[in-house]
Amino acid sequence: MPGLRPILRFNPLSVCLNKHQIEIRVSRLISKVLIVFKRVNLDLLTINSKVMEFTYFIGTDVSKNELDFAVMCGKTLLFHQEIANTEQAITLFIKGLTRLPAFDLDNAVFCMEHTGIYNNHLLAYLHKKKANIWLESAIQIKRSSGNIRGKNDKVDAIRIADYAYTKRDKVRLWAPKREVIQQLAGLTSVRTRLIEAKKMLKTPLQEQNSFNTKRVVSKGAAVCSHTLKAIDADLEKAEKAIDELIAKDPELKRLFSLVASVIGIGKVTATQILITTNEFKDITNAKQYACYAGVAPFIKESGIFKGKGRVSHMANKKVKTLLHMSAIVAIQYNQDLKCYYNRKVNEQKKNKMSVINAVRNKLILRIFACVNHNSTYQNNYQKLLA
C-alpha cells in the first residue's frame, strides 16, 4: 500500500553469511545460545518424563478420625472416598486402588497437607510400600486455588488432588526424618509443654502477692507445691533424655557442637535448629533459614512507592523467639556484635529492633558457616591471605 514502508528485520547472522564474513563474537554468541537451547531441551525432557511418570494424582484431606481421598487420572476426577484414619482402613483402600486400570504405586502420587501427627498412619503405610508422597503446606495449596467460598473435607481433597496435577512439574517427594530426629522433636515438645504448665501455675501465684493476704497466697502455694516439684522433676528428666539422645548419635553430636560453639546459641536453640533443618538436610543455606525463621527482610515496591524492608509474619515463631534471645545474649558477651549494636544504635541512630534482627541474621550466617566448614566458631578468626 502507498505510504507504508516495509518492516525490515535485522539479523546479524544473515548479514554475515551474505557478506561471507565470519565474526568471532557472533559465532561465540551463537554457540552459547545453542548450548543454552540444548540445556533447556534436556531440562524439558527431564520435566516431561517426571510429568509422564505420574498417571494418578490422589489428594488426601487428613483429620483426626477420617481421611478423605480424591482420586484423579490426569485431570479427570474418578471418585471420592472417605475412610477411617486407621491402619486397617488405609490398607483396604490402597488394595482397592490396585483394581484401577494400569494403576501402580510407581505412577501415582499421594498429595496431602502438613497436619502434625494425624497423618502418621498414612505416611507410615505409604512409605513402607515405597509410594510417592508429596507433603505440601496448607497455605501454598490454599493460595493456588484462588478465591475459595465454602469448605468441606470432600472439596478440600479434590482441591489437593487438582493442586498435585496442576503443579506436577514441581513435585517435591517427601522422605521421613531419621528416628533419632523424630525422638528429639518429641522430647523438645514435651519439654515445652512442661514449661508452659509450670508457667500457668506459677505466674498467678506470683501475681497474688500484691493483691491478696499472705494467708491466701500461702494456701494457694501449698496446694500447688507438689505439682510444681513434680513438673521440675519431669523437666529434669526430659532435658537429661535430650542430652543422652544427642550424645549417643555421632552425627547429632557433631552438628550440635558446631552450632552451640557460636556465642549466644544455647542448648535449647541449637537443638531446635537441628530439628527444624532436619540435620541441615532440608534447609541447607543461611538465606533459606533466615526466611524460615522470619529474620530476612523483604521490600515491597509498587510504581513510585518504595517501601522499607520488613520481615514477614509467615515464620516459625518459636525459632524466631529463640534467635531473639540468642541475639540478646550475643550482644552482651560477644565483643564484635556488642560493638556492632552500639555503633548502629548510638552513632547511626538505627531502630533497636532492626539492629537486633540484623544480629539474628549474623548468628544464622555464623551457624551455617560453621556447619559448612565443619569447624567450630572462632571468635578471633583472621582470614589468611595468599
Image (spheres, rainbow, N blue to C red):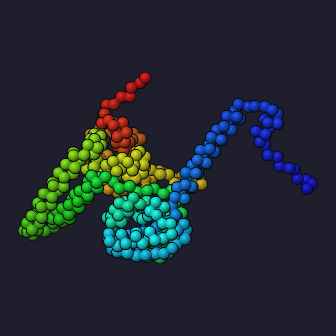
* Residue that protrudes farthest toward the right in the picture: 2
In the picture provided, is 6 more to the left or to the right than 353? Answer: right
Give the residue at x 36% y 36%. Answer: 373
- Of the 4 image quadrants, the one containing the C terminus is top left
Residue 84 visible in the current orientation: yes
> Taking 7 as reference, is 83 above or below it?
below
Give the residue at x 58% y 51%. Answer: 45
Q: Residue 81: percent from the left, percent from the top?
A: 43, 75
Identify which residue, 87 or 345, lies in the foreground. Answer: 87
Identify which residue, 103 or 11, lies in the foreground. Answer: 103
Give the residue at x 35% y 73%. Answer: 89
**Tag count in the figure?**
0
Identify which residue, 258 or 192, lies in the foreground. Answer: 258
In the picture provided, is 191 more to the left or to the right than 131? Answer: left
Residue 353 visible in the current orientation: no
Identify which residue, 36 or 86, lies in the foreground. Answer: 86
Quadrant of res 136: bottom left
Q: Residue 269: percent from the left, percent from the top?
A: 28, 49
> Taking 92 as reference, is 352 above or below it?
above
Give the residue at x 41% y 45%. Answer: 285
Q: Residue 208: percent from the left, percent from the top?
A: 15, 66
- Of the 4 image quadrants, the one containing the N terminus is bottom right
In the picture provided, is 115 more to the left or to the right than 72? Answer: left
In the picture provided, is 42 more to the left or to the right than 5? Answer: left
Q: Residue 54: percent from the left, percent from the top?
A: 51, 61
